[in-house]
Image: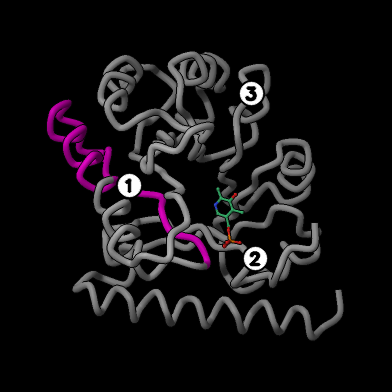
């Protein structure tokens, strides 16, 4: 990769880190209460190496085959799966990832637990919620979330850590803030009702809306475009 691309990536990551700090300060939060997940889908391995060279450790991928190739080349990074899950692909997810943000069924959770090698430690799981109640959108409904967590939180080789959502795009700031706030309330309700102190994570906010997500309590923001530029594929 050309050296200027490497510099661009380092500069952009530094800019995002500064914006995270600023958003945390405005929200009265500690800057290290928000973690940056660099979404490297469709990016080549050199671009991923450039990200790692800045000290950024957490990488997110959506497409399993592409992801597995990268994980095998760079096994020391911390890899997060954030794409749609077909239940016949859970084995590869269980063996290649440290986190998965997009679980929305009991079947997938049971398979991940059964297929995770116990000596790797449990895989961290977030439940994807269809928080804006869109037709055809992935994720469990808000009403079904508590019941799903209740059925799967005791599984051996997964560790349930919280919720993830991709709210419907909107130009209404109030609607956007409400969607993120609803996800936070739902996480708090589930953690309180089921007495799950580790159910403390919220994966929400992308390039276009991460400051608002941080204002509402995001602990993971998933950023692609602001790090790598516009995706061409
Ligand atoms: C692609 C993707 C992102 C990153 O989106 P950007 O707008 O490029 O920051 C975040 N989360 C998920 C689930 C994605 O698929």
Q: Is 195 situated above or below 77?
A: above
- Circle 1 residues within 10 Å: few <14, some 14–19, many ≥20: many
Q: CA distance from mark 2 to mark 3?
A: 29 Å
Q: Are marks 2 and 3 in contact (CB under 8 Å)?
A: no
Relative placement, left or right, of 59 versus 21 is right
Nearest to N terminus: mark 3 or mark 1: 3
Task: Name the disc covering residue 15, or none.
Answer: none
Q: Could you tell me residue 30's position as x and y percent?
A: 25, 70
Q: Secondary structure at mark 2?
A: helix
Location of mark 1 (residue)? 201
Q: Quadrant of the N terminus?
A: bottom right
Where on the image, by quarter, is ligand 1?
A: bottom right
Q: Quadrant of the C terminus?
A: bottom right
Residue at (57, 70) in percent of width and height: 55
Q: Residue furthest right?
A: 2
Q: Could you tell me residue 148's position as x and y percent?
A: 33, 20
Q: Secondary structure at mark 3?
A: loop
Task: Name the disc covering residue 86, or none.
Answer: 3
Q: Could you tell me residue 220's position as x and y percent?
A: 41, 56
Residue at (28, 63) in percent of width and height: 174
- Circle 2 residues within 10 Å: few <14, some 14–19, many ≥20: some
Q: CA distance from mark 3 to mark 1?
A: 24 Å
Mark closer to the observer (3, 1): 3
Mark closer to the observer (2, 1): 1
Location of mark 2 (residue)? 52
**Residue interval drawn in magenta:** 183-207
Q: Is residue 137 magenta?
A: no
Q: Is residue 191 magenta?
A: yes
């Amino acid at each position: 990769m050309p050296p200027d691309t490497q510099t661009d990536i380092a500069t952009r990551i530094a800019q995002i880190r500064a914006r995270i700090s600023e958003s945390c300060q405005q929200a009265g939060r500690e800057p290290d209460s928000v973690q940056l997940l660099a979404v490297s889908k469709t990016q080549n391995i050199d671009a991923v190496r450039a990200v790692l060279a800045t000290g950024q450790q957490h990488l997110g991928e959506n497409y399993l085959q592409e992801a597995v190739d990268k994980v095998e080349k760079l096994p020391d990074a911390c890899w997060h799966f954030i794409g749609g899950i077909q239940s016949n692909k859970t084995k590869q997810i269980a063996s290649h990832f440290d986190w998965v943000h997009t679980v929305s069924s009991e079947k997938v959770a049971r398979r991940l637990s059964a297929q995770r090698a116990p000596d790797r430690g449990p895989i961290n799981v977030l439940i994807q919620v269809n928080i804006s109640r869109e037709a055809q959108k992935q994720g469990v409904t808000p009403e079904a979330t508590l019941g799903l967590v209740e059925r799967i939180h005791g599984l051996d080789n997964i560790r349930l850590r919280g919720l993830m959502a991709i709210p419907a795009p909107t130009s209404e700031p109030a609607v956007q803030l409400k969607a993120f706030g609803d996800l936070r309330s739902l996480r708090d309700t589930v953690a309180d009702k089921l007495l799950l102190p580790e159910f403390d994570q919220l994966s929400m906010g992308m390039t276009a809306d991460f400051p608002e997500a941080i204002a509402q309590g995001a602990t993971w923001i998933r950023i692609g475009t602001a790090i790598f530029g516009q995706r061409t594929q």
